[in-house]
Image (cartoon, rainbow, N blue to C red):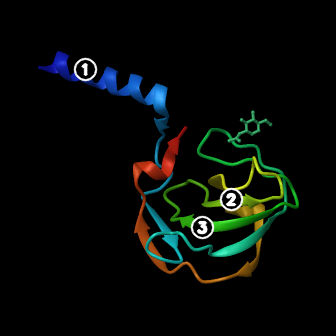
Amino acid sequence: MARTLVLWLLGLVAVCAVHGIFMDRLASKKLCADDDCVYAISLARAQEDYNAPDCRFINISKGQQIYVYSKLVRENAAGEFWAGSVYSDSQDEMGIVGYFPSNLVKEQHVYQEATKEVPTTAVDFFCE
Ligand SMILES: *[C@@H]1O[C@H](CO)[C@@H](O)[C@H](O)[C@H]1NC(C)=O
């Protein structure tokens, strides 16, 4: 029985390795402007460069503008992370949503306050 479970888990890991992978959740809750987190909360500008430590995060260059879609609710000693996408003319960066430390950016324009608390799911931290 235990052996079957181990094999099954190994199989699951193998499938994830091929098709993408579910990473650890950074937080269990997030704040959004709406229930589905589809509307931008704000437009922010990066005050510093940021190198994504893994595929959950996005690379940011100082001066870039970022649409913020959700704000993770800080847990324990972890820093505060927001999810967003870089606003850019270049097609390859446009539309990729990832996390970044909130203290690296300054909100310039708040469209709507993030008042909806939504639980995060594994898909929020899925890496391709
Ligand atoms: C971030 O940039 C580095 C190169 O500077 C690259 O290797 C890495 O894949 C990029 N990460 C993401 C998540 O785009």
Please, what is the three-letter code of the amino acid marked with disc 2? Ser
Choose mark 3 or mark 1, whichever is in front: 3
Location of residue 73 with respect to 126 vertically, above or below: below
Of pointers 3 and 1, the one earlier in the residue sequence: 1
Tell me the SS state at disc 1: helix
Describe residue 3's horizontal placement relative to residue 10 as left or right.
left
Depth check, front residue: 24 or 127 = 127
Residue under the point 44% across and 49% down: 123
CB of mark 3 within 8 Å of CB of mark 1? no
Of pointers 1 and 2, the one earlier in the residue sequence: 1
Q: Which mark is residue 6?
A: 1
Tell me the SS state at disc 2: strand
Return the x and y of residue 63 as percentages of the image width and height. 88, 61
Q: Which mark is residue 69?
A: 3
Choose mark 1 or mark 2, whichever is in front: 2
Rendering quadrant holding ligand 1: top right
Please, what is the three-letter code of the amino acid marked with disc 1? Val
CB of mark 3 within 8 Å of CB of mark 2? yes
Q: Which mark is residue 85?
A: 2
Measure the alpha-carbon separation of dots 3 and 2: 8 Å
Q: Judge the density around disc 1: few (<14), some (14-19), many (≥20) Cα neighbours within 10 Å.
A: few
Measure the alpha-carbon separation of dots 1 and 2: 38 Å
For disc 3, does the CB lie below 8 Å from ligand 1?
no
Q: Judge the density around disc 3: few (<14), some (14-19), many (≥20) Cα neighbours within 10 Å.
A: many
Q: Quadrant of the N terminus?
A: top left
Please, what is the three-letter code of the amino acid marked with disc 3? Tyr
Return the x and y of residue 81 as percentages of the image width and height. 61, 58
